[in-house]
Image (cartoon, grey):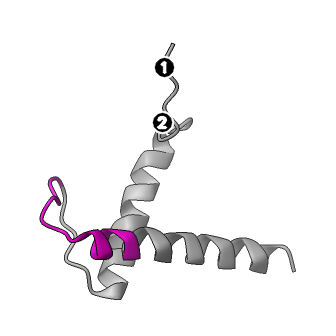
Amino acid sequence: MTNSSSKMEVPQAKDAMNRFKMEVANEIGVNLKQGYNGDLTSREAGSIGGEMVRQMIKKQEESMK
């Protein structure tokens, strides 16, 4: 039995997360493209994920006010 933590429970969420990832990359100036992005540095890839988390936390905190 394999359990992947990166598996999306809701298929539509995958598309939404991909759009969000592209938006964040654009906002922070990382050249993310559809498909292969193996040419990104670890720093660039990490900055995208980190900013995504920051924005999600901020949105959640605002919704709790």
Q: Is residue 36 magenta?
A: yes
Three-letter code for the amino acid on which mark 1 is drawn = Thr
Classed neighbour count for the residue bearing mark 1: other residues with Cα under 10 Å, few (<14), some (14–19), many (≥20) = few
Where residue 28 is drawn, which disc sits there? Answer: none
Residue shown at 38% from the left, 63% from the top: 19
Q: Nearer the viewer, mark 2 or mark 1?
A: 1
Check disc 2 and report the residue beneath it. Answer: 7
Image quadrant where residue 61 sits: bottom right
In this view, the residue farthest toward the front is 42
> Would residue 58 appear left or right of 61 to someone viewing this image?
left
> Would you identify the image quadrant in which residue 29 lies?
bottom left
Q: Tag 1 or tag 2, which sits nearer the N-term?
A: 1
**SS state under label 2:** loop
For the point 21% across and 71% down, the residue is 41
Crowd band around label 2 with a 10 angstrom C-alpha radius: few (<14), some (14–19), many (20+): few
**Residue at 37% across, 57% down:** 18
Residue on which disc 1 sits = 2
Seen in the image, is 36 located left or right of residue 5? left
| Region rendered in magenta | 35-47
